[in-house]
Image (cartoon, rainbow, N blue to C red):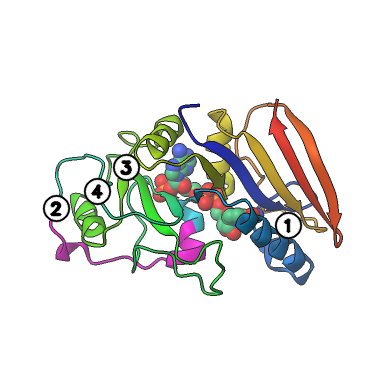
Amino acid sequence: MNRPYIICHMVTSIDGKVTGDFLFQKESAEATEIYYRINRERKADGFICGRVTMEGSFTGGWYPDLNQYNPVEKKSDFTAVERSGFYAIAFDTHGKLGWKSNRIVDPDGDPGYDGAQIVEVLSEDVDDRYLGYLESMKIPYIFAGETFIDVELALFKLKDLMGCETLLLEGGSILDGAFERAGDVDELSLVVAPVIAGKDSKPLFMDADIANFELVKFENEKGNLVLNYKRK
Ligand SMILES: NC(=O)c1ccc[n+]([C@@H]2O[C@H](COP(=O)([O-])OP(=O)(O)OC[C@H]3O[C@@H](n4cnc5c(N)ncnc54)[C@H](OP(=O)(O)O)[C@@H]3O)[C@@H](O)[C@H]2O)c1
């Protein structure tokens, strides 16, 4: 395979939703703990999230003052940084994420996230000064499209340039949908919390097409359903 093996790992509600308040109810807390444990156990080369999830989970919307950075006009991949450990890969089309460090600082120190080396996947529609900011932070970046991110190209480069063999795709709904439409979800790892989500919650795969998966594992763990499917 000329791309990493992709495991879409998510907490869902009974009705297959992945965003919204249901995630933060006490009834979902156990599912979240199981989710974090599986994230650690899979020992992937990294995890991938969409820009909105990265903002909500890690950057909190902070953004640097780009006037302080030199523009980098040439749109070429920047991977010549010292690399170690596992990756936190942000699909950030227009370079909207502001990182204060080149590694994830997880508030709970979870070893499945804490210390992960940040990688930015970008389109060419980014401010040249944002590239200068990333380089000054020693954050590697790769380009995968002119104005939007071509999932196939991004994955090809993540294997070819960053050496990723297996990656966890960890949301949210919009990015999972883009991967599924591209046919790039090889396995599903779901923890179903015993909750129905609210009407504003989004589905596991936003705007997905019909696809077939085979159930390979199911377990009841303290009232939460732990499921594994492989693409047929
Ligand atoms: N249940 C779970 O296990 C779980 C896990 C993770 C997150 N979540 C939840 O998911 C929510 C966020 O999900 P979301 O669906 O709103 O957003 P998302 O999938 O996290 O991020 C979507 C954004 O990713 C960027 N992107 C980059 N490449 C893309 C591509 N090829 N196609 C589409 N988008 C691309 C776009 O950013 P631009 O808009 O900048 O172009 C897009 O708006 C959070 O509230 C979080 O709580 C749940």
User: Looking at the image, is 108 positioned above or below residue 42?
Assistant: below
Work out whether mark 2 precedes mark 1 in sequence or the reverse, and give the earlier one.
Answer: 2
Residue labelled with disc 1 = 198
- Mark 1 crowdedness (10 Å alpha carbons): few <14, some 14-19, many ≥20: some
* Residue linked to disc 2: 71
Instruction: Pick whichever of labels 1 and 3 is earlier in the sequence.
Output: 3
Q: How far apart are the two marked residues, 2 and 1, measured between alpha carbons?
A: 44 Å
Helix, strand, or loop for circle 1? loop
Q: CA distance from mark 4 to mark 2?
A: 18 Å
Which of label 4 and label 3 is nearer to you?
4
Q: Amino acid at mark 3?
A: Ile
- Tag 3 residue: 142
Work out how far the residue at label 1 is from the one at label 3, CA to CA, in angstroms.
36 Å
Q: Position of residue 139 (x, y in %)?
A: 30, 56
Question: Which residue bears the numbered disc 4?
Answer: 80
Tell me the magenta residue range: 54-70
Marked residue nearer the N-terminal end (4 or 1): 4
**In the image, is the residue at mark 1 within 8 Å of ligand 1 by its beta carbon?**
no
Q: Amino acid at mark 4?
A: Ala
- Could you tell me residue 161's position as x and y percent? 34, 39
**Viewer-nearest residue: 164 or 139:** 164
- Please state if 128 lies on the left or on the right of 1 as rendered: left
Please report whichever mark, 4 or 3, sits nearer to the chain's N-terminal start.
4
Residue 98 x, y percent position in the rendering: 34, 62
Q: Give the side of residue 160 with respect to residue 173, left or right.
A: left
Looking at the image, residue 109 lies above or below residue 78: below
| Callout 4 touching callout 3 (CB < 8 Å) | no
Q: Residues within 10 Å of mark 4 (few under 14, many from 20)?
A: few
